[in-house]
Image: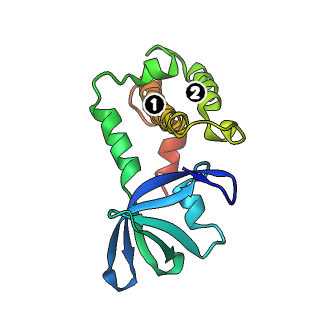
């Protein structure tokens, strides 16, 4: 999707929105491709584009939104967890015995390569932009999993001094 008036690539985010008066809307928010849902909800604009499941375009007031739930982010995380071919170590290009610093370095390299802002001024097909966004999300999820594994291996599943002292308060 492309907004000719602003020259921005757009994306849709599947959501379930609770409005004032307990009215529930299910559909997709239409937002700039380089912004997160959180950024769009907190910007200065008063309205947001919303497409219902019947493809009816509406503008809803942000002030009337009581609760919003992104369906896409949870689906992506669930799919990655269920996918038997998904290996977070392979995605980051590290082994299971790689130390914390090298894992961090590998993550930064991959994150830079697939960061959506890097392609902001490049006219790419929407499929390529979707791929870049998906890879960015996968890299972040993989880093979280690998980092957790690396810390568990390094500390033998025990709390570090910092973690122990912070949990006392």
- Do labels 2 and 1 touch, CB within 8 Å? yes
Residue 158 relative to residue 44: left or right: left
Residue located farthest toward the right when viewing the structure as drawn:
121
Residue located farthest toward the bottom when viewing the structure as drawn:
21
Counting residues from the start of the chain, the first of labels 2 and 1 encountered is 2
Residue located farthest toward the front when viewing the structure as drawn:
4
- Placement of 102 over or under 22, stated as above or below: above
Q: Residue at x 65, y 31 (%)?
A: 112
Q: Position of residue 117 (x, y in %)?
A: 67, 41
Instruction: Report the coloring of the rendering.
Output: rainbow
- Placement of 138 over or under 92, stated as above or below: below
Q: Position of residue 16 (x, y in %)?
A: 35, 64
Nearer the observer, 157 or 16? 16
Q: Position of residue 136 (x, y in %)?
A: 53, 35
Q: CA distance from mark 2 to mark 1?
A: 9 Å
What residue did someone put label 2 on?
Answer: 107
- Placement of 115 over or under 31, stated as above or below: above
Nearer the observer, 111 or 89? 111
Q: Residues within 10 Å of mark 2 (few under 14, many from 20)?
A: many
- Placement of 31 over or under 96, stated as above or below: below
What residue did someone put label 1 on?
Answer: 142
The quarter of the displayed image where residue 106 is located: top right
Element on which disc 1 rests: helix
Determine which of the numbered discs, if any, sits on residue 44 in the image: none
């Amino acid at each position: 999707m492309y907004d000719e008036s602003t020259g921005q690539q757009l994306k849709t985010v599947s959501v379930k929105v609770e409005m004032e008066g307990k009215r529930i809307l299910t559909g997709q928010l239409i937002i700039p491709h380089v912004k997160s849902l959180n950024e769009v909800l907190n910007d200065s604009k008063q309205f947001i584009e919303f497409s219902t499941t019947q493809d009816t375009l509406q503008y809803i007031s942000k002030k009337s939104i009581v609760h919003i739930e992104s369906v896409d982010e949870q689906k992506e995380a669930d799919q990655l967890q269920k996918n038997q071919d998904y290996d977070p170590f392979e995605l980051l290009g590290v082994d299971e015995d790689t130390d914390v610093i090298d894992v961090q370095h590998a993550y930064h390299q991959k994150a830079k390569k697939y960061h959506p802002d890097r392609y902001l001024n490049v006219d790419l097909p929407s499929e390529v932009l979707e791929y870049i966004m998906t890879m960015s999300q996968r890299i972040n999820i993989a880093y979280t999993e690998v980092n957790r594994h690396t810390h568990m291996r390094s500390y033998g599943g025990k709390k570090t001094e910092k973690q122990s002292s912070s949990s006392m308060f």
